[in-house]
Amino acid sequence: MLEKELIRQITLDLTGIKSVVGTLGEIRAAEKVYHFLNALDYYTQHPDYLTLSDLKEDTLGRKNVVALLKGEKGHSQDTVILIGHIDTVGVADYGNIKKYATDPIKLQELLGNKKLNDDTLKDLASGDWMFGRGIFDMKAGVAAQMALLKKLSESVDQLEGNVVFVAVPDEEGNSRGMLSAVDELLRLGEENDLTYIAAVDTDYMSPRFPGDDKKYIYIGTVGKILPCFYVYGKETHVGQVFEGLDANLLASKILREVNLSFDLCDVVENEVTLPPISLRLQDLKSKYSVQTVNEAYLYFNYSTHSSQPDEVLTKMKTKAEKAFKNALHRLNDEYRSYCRAADIPFQEVPWSVQVLTFEELYSAVRAEVGVSIDESLDKLKQELLKKKPDDRIYSLRIVRELRRHWSNKNPVIIVFFAPPYYPHNYVRGKDENERKLLAAVNEAVAHVSTEHPYKFVVKKFYPYISDLSYCSISRDSKVINALVSNMPGWNEIYSLPIESIQKLNVPVVNIGPYGKDAHKFTERVNMPYSFEVMPKILEKTVRLLLDR
Ligand SMILES: [Zn+2]
């Protein structure tokens, strides 16, 4: 079978297994991958190198597939990691044809009867595209990796160095598959004396704007963090509006300072992150009354190329201070005008700017009340853990409780982090592995572009949040401390295997299949590129990485 035929067939087989994140389908998809590899001669000879292993503390019993392939030429310990996720998002977006979301052949027929935009209709008619849930994100990518592993295993005597392939679930959820894989990779590395030099993912790649015909390869990945603000104002009656400090006013000023602010974008090597965008803004009043709002909560999705948690925390604190100042200005200005019109004496409002990080608040309260604060917080945590609230709400409740124990009852903004956290991976060429990856990818792309005249562009940051984030994390204790000490639910509702990720510490690249509309019912993969061109770049990159 031609390689592109094989990749097409595996893609169809994998897509046919509905593996929506958080369901048992993820286990079936892992089994499918496992059985394919298990049937290869190489794994018949080396059964120990192929495992279907349980995720840590996973109530669904989901599994990773881990396959080691040891080159038999020379004695190189260099090892390339191939990562692919086998889960997909749900299928509700397919509406009345959702039964066929994972049946590309039938789906192709049914989509013909749907109202689709011109671009989709054109692709549907061309015969170059295949539709289906997960086909593009990222079963076609996993298929290319499986085909490569098969190919390499057939001439293992020609291969110097090693490859470890991991197929993981839960990428579209909480990355539990990848986070378990990090420890498995370390264990496997120790047992077999492997030196990991790079990780290669084949997650999806899309046009960046309508009409974009470039094909992107990304060396590195974007990160994401969730800065949160708990706002505590001063309540008043609607009859004395200038006697209080409306928490909604403070929150709106924070929103204005942070939301979409270009000055918070990371610009690295001419690549810019999207600015922060609010994901929540709420006051904490439970019902109608004529008392004004004295508590509010907001948080933002914050993308990073270079900013570390300690820097983000400082930037958020500065923004909150400015927001606080702006709120007091507005209050004083409006009060002055009001006093003039009402002919009463004006006096500036009594509050001043007060912004603390969670860590600072904790220190302040701890200094006042001692260990009893830990007992109070523990009690609350026990209650909360029973109710399993949303991670963001859990975090908020801890902050709220902590402030309640503080003797300072003046208005304050507390800045902290809530889960999840995805570190960015910036490959600048600072060490041997990074330089090698940059060179290998560039050479592989140049090589393939002589045969296939696509407009290839090598960029630095894979723009979609992915498991690649967990291939490295800052080794600076100041950075890690800023994250951990300001995330109230750390080690309770959320944690990362920080030391393991620090040890793994490899640069990453995403060489993706090409397609459109990931997470939409028109999700589709472009076959000529994804089954033939992208696999060549993948293979060439892996071979160049292992070439000494
Ligand atoms: Zn994906």
Image (cartoon, rainbow, N blue to C red):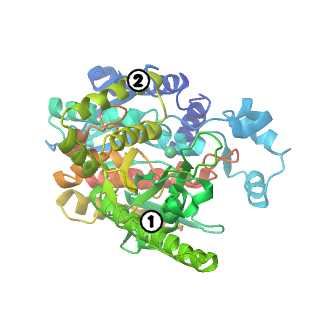
The quadrant of the rendering that contains the C terminus is bottom left
Is 180 situated left or right of 122 in this image? left
Classify 220 as above or below 158: below
Which residue is drawn at the image coordinates 21% and 56% (left, top)?
433
**Picture layout, residue 242 above or below residue 171:** below
Q: Quadrant of residue 90?
A: top right
- Along the viewing direction, whichever of 414 and 78 lies nearer the viewer: 414
Which of the pair 208/455 is nearer the observer?
208
- Determine which residue is flagged by label 1: 273
Q: Residue furthest right?
A: 113
Image location of residue 257, percent across then percent down: 47, 68
Q: How many marks?
A: 2
Instruction: Give the amino acid at mark 2.
Output: Glu
Q: Please, what secondary structure does the residue beneath circle 2 have?
A: helix
**Where does the image place residue 248, in percent across and percent down from the top left?**
54, 57
Decide if residue 226 is on the left or right side of residue 506: right
Q: Is mark 1 within 8 Å of ligand 1?
A: no
Q: Pointer 2: what residue?
A: 383
